[in-house]
Amino acid sequence: MKVAADFNKRVLVHSESLNWTPSPMPGVDRKPLDRVGDEVARATSIVRYAPGSEFSPHVHTGGEEFLVLEGVFQDEHGDYPPGSYVRNPPQSKHQPGAKNGCVIFVKLWQFQILDRTQVRLQTDFMASIPHSDYKDVAVTPLYKDDFEEVSLLYFQPEAEMSLAVTGGAELLVLAGSIDEQADTLIKHSWLRLPVNGQMQIKAGHKGAKVWLKTGHLIDVDEQISRVASA
């Protein structure tokens, strides 16, 4: 299966307008944003767990990264309320589910293969700091290594940001709205920019909260190759 599989193109998806499609696990539905592969795939998705649904125990051979959007996600390691940001590195394993249901934004098979860094953050309880380069923008750093950087950005009304994304970028609007080039992105709109792209953001009149990831599209061909050989 291929969804938004040309990583040389700018892609915008207003995920709230997409229909849910069932996964192989009863009670778990998803909205694919990009995908290369079948059930083993390099994939970015919005996933919804019905109350009481769960996956069987499994290993994330290529790693899993997710942000809880609604409800409480759970596994044998704990509960993850809204705002939880988790990185389960390659070779990690768990049994995910949601007693009362949840919605998460999740990315699979997009790690450096030797990454073994486990991250579990409750971002709603983390402070933000003024951005060093942009007025009226605050940032909460979530993760950074030699390969990628992940953060939450808080835009005051009509704040602006212009960013060259040499390693590519993607963002998910969590609250408020932004304009990027000629498009308006609202809650749960998702944008992917290619390597050597240019991001031009202006927040709406109520400001915005945005999840941003940069640098990770440099070796996308290697990520897809690992999926194909899995």
Image (cartoon, rainbow, N blue to C red):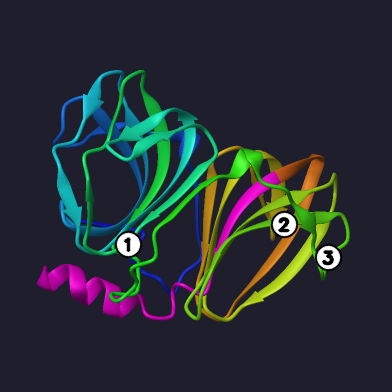
Q: Is residue 112 magenta?
A: no
The residues colored magenta run 209-230
Q: Which amino acid type is shown beneath numbered disc 3?
A: Tyr
The 10 Å Cα crowd at callout 1, few under 14, some 14 to 19, many 20 or more, is many
In the foreground, 181 or 94:
94
In the foreground, 5 or 162:
162
Q: Nearer the viewer, mark 1 or mark 2?
A: 1
Coordinates of residue 19 in the picture (x, y in percent) = 36, 31
Sequence-wise, the earlier of marks 3 and 1 is 1
Q: Which mark is residue 139?
A: 2
In the displayed structure, does residue 108 sit left or right of residue 164? left
How far is mark 2 from mark 3, CA to CA? 10 Å
Identify the element where label 1 is drawn: loop
Coordinates of residue 125 in the picture (x, y in percent) = 65, 40
Q: Which amino acid type is shown beneath numbered disc 2?
A: Val
How far is mark 3 from mark 1, CA to CA? 32 Å
Identify the element where label 3 is drawn: loop
> Residue at point 82% right, 69% down?
132
Q: Which residue is mark 3?
A: 134
> Residue at point 20% right, 62% down?
61
Q: Which residue is mark 1?
A: 89
> Residue at point 50% right, 72% down?
148
